[in-house]
Structure formats: C-alpha cells, structure tokens
C-alpha cells in the first residue's frame, strides 16, 4: 500500500503543473451533480469510487471509508464531506483544506447549501440561477385533495424506514403527503406489525447500495395485510439529498395523482 501511495504521489507531483489552482476532493457523491451544474469540473481532483461524474478525478475509497492518506496526497484546497457520522469532526483536523459539510435534510436546506457552495467556489451567479431553476421546478407539484400516508423502506433486512430527519420525509411533504413514522431520526428500525398498524396509502421501497435486490414487499409473508400501493424507487434519486430530490418530489406527486381514488 505504501508503494502504491508513493507511486501516486510521484504521478500527482508530475501532474501538478497542469492542475488547476483550486483543488477539490468530494467525499459525498450527492454533491457532485451540484458542482457540475455550477460549472465546477476540472477542479475536482478526488472523488469516491461510486462517483463517476468527474472521470479525471482520483478514486479515494468510499464516503464511509475514504483513504485519508490518498486524500492528503491530492493536496485539496477544499474538502467536501457528508454527515458527522460519515466524517467525524476529528478527521477534519488532519487536513489544511477548508472543509465544507454537506448534510441537508430538507429541500430548503439543499437550496441553502447550493448558495453556500456558490459563495465558497466563486460561483454565486450560477448558484442563484440553479436555486431559481429548482424552485421553479417545484411549481409543477399539483395540490392534492388528500394527504396520503407514505412509508419509505430504507432496508428490508433489518427492516428500516425513513424517519423525520430523512430528506425523504421532506420530499413526501413537498409532494403533498405525510410520513406517519414520527421518530426524530433519519432511519428507524420498525416491525412489520407497526407498519400495518400505521395503515399507509403508499409503501415505497428503495433499491440501491443500502437495499440490494430486496424481495418485493407484496411477496413477504409478514406483509400479507398490507393494502398500500407498493412502488420500487431508485435509492440515488430519493434518499441522496441533491438535485435529484426535486425530480423525486415531482415524480411522487404524479404517483399520488395517478392512484388517487376520490371517495363517494
């Protein structure tokens, strides 16, 4: 491993003459589409292994287990990280770089983060335009004559759902629905019996790195009594706060209308 790091150090040293003045390492993939929309691209010198928006960037591991020595070799001016759980405060002290923590829980906080990133990166005008574009996009949401109850499955084993601190809950709210799971946490362990007792109108279950190849809920024996509309959604679109959160809101609002059955 030391030899690999030394080799990369030499390569990066030779490459430094062509490097841009600003060097950014992104350890939270959800922020990358925002950076690209702001016109930031060649400045990104490092990303996590599942982040494919910047092909010129060096892969530095996952967002939960980044290779810190490799990050140091990249000599970032700005380090963009996620939550304190993913990247604790004590780790930020190891770097001379400015550290920006991207951890929004609502659509409003996403817009706030875009403005902050615009200011940090000298892209204020671009950030204002992007915020205006996303805000206008939300005007496509049509007001509903009812408030559907929506439960969002994060993982099937163990059974976890989105709590009130998840961006998914704000997407549900903005789309016109309500998350009946009231726990003030991002993810909540829950029993099938509790879900049935909450009697949701919609049961969304994500598929992605956190919930790989889940068995469809309607095929699970413990959900025989589930009368909700069951829909599989992509994890990256719904559970990762960013530009996709606004598209997810519009998509969910359309689903609410598609399955709306007025009572007589």
Image (cartoon, helix red, strand yellow):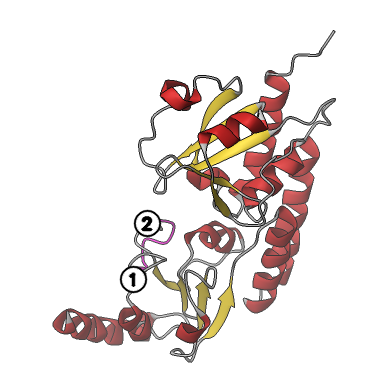
Q: Quadrant of the C terminus?
A: top right
Residue 50 bears which disc, if any?
2
Q: In this view, does 20 lie above or below 162?
A: below
* Closer-to-camera residue (203/108): 203
Residue 263 bears which disc, if any?
none
Q: In whole angstroms, how far apart are the C-alphas of marks 1 and 2?
A: 10 Å
The image quadrant that residue 101 belongs to is bottom right
At x 60%, y 19%, the residue is: 227
Upstream in the sequence, badge 1 or badge 2?
A: 2
Q: In which quarter of the image is the N terminus?
A: bottom left
At x 82%, y 12%, the residue is: 263
At x 49%, y 65%, the residue is: 28
Where residue 66 appears, as percent x and y from the top left, is 36, 72
The image quadrant that residue 37 belongs to is bottom right
Q: In this picture, which residue range is highlighted in magenta?
A: 52-60
**Residue 153, magenta (yes or no):** no
Q: Is residue 142 above or below residue 169?
A: above
Q: Is residue 254 above or below residue 75?
A: above
- Give SS at disc 2: loop
Q: In this view, does 56 lie above or below 7?
A: above
State left or right for residue 72 relative to residue 170. left
Q: Main secondary structure of the magenta part?
A: loop
Residue 60 bears which disc, if any?
1
Where residue 72 appears, as percent x and y from the top left, is 36, 85
State left or right for residue 58 relative to residue 90. left
* Closer-to-camera residue (2/182): 182
């Amino acid at each position: 491993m030391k030899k690999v790091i030394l080799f990369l150090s030499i390569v990066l040293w030779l490459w430094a003459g062509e490097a841009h003045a600003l060097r950014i390492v992104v350890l939270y993939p959800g922020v990358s589409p925002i950076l690209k929309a702001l016109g930031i691209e060649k400045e990104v010198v490092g990303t996590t292994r599942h982040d494919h928006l910047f092909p010129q960037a060096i892969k530095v591991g996952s967002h939960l287990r980044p290779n810190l020595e490799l990050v140091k070799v990249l000599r970032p001016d700005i380090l963009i990280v996620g939550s304190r759980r993913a990247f604790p405060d004590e780790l930020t002290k190891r770097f001379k770089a400015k550290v920006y923590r991207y951890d929004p829980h609502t659509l409003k906080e996403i817009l706030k983060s875009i403005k902050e990133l615009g200011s940090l990166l000298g892209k204020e005008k671009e950030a204002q335009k992007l915020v205006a574009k996303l805000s206008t996009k939300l005007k496509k949401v049509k007001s509903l004559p009812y408030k559907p109850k929506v439960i969002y499955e994060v993982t099937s084993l163990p059974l976890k759902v989105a709590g009130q601190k998840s961006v998914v809950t704000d997407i549900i709210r903005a789309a016109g629905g309500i998350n009946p799971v009231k726990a003030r946490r991002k993810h909540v362990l829950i029993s099938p019996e509790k879900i049935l007792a909450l009697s949701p109108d919609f049961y969304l279950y994500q598929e992605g790195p956190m919930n790989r190849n889940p068995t469809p809920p309607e095929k699970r024996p413990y959900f025989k009594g589930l009368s909700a509309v069951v829909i599989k959604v992509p994890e990256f679109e719904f559970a990762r706060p960013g530009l996709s959160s606004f598209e997810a809101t519009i998509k969910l609002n359309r689903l609410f209308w598609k399955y709306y059955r007025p009572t007589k």
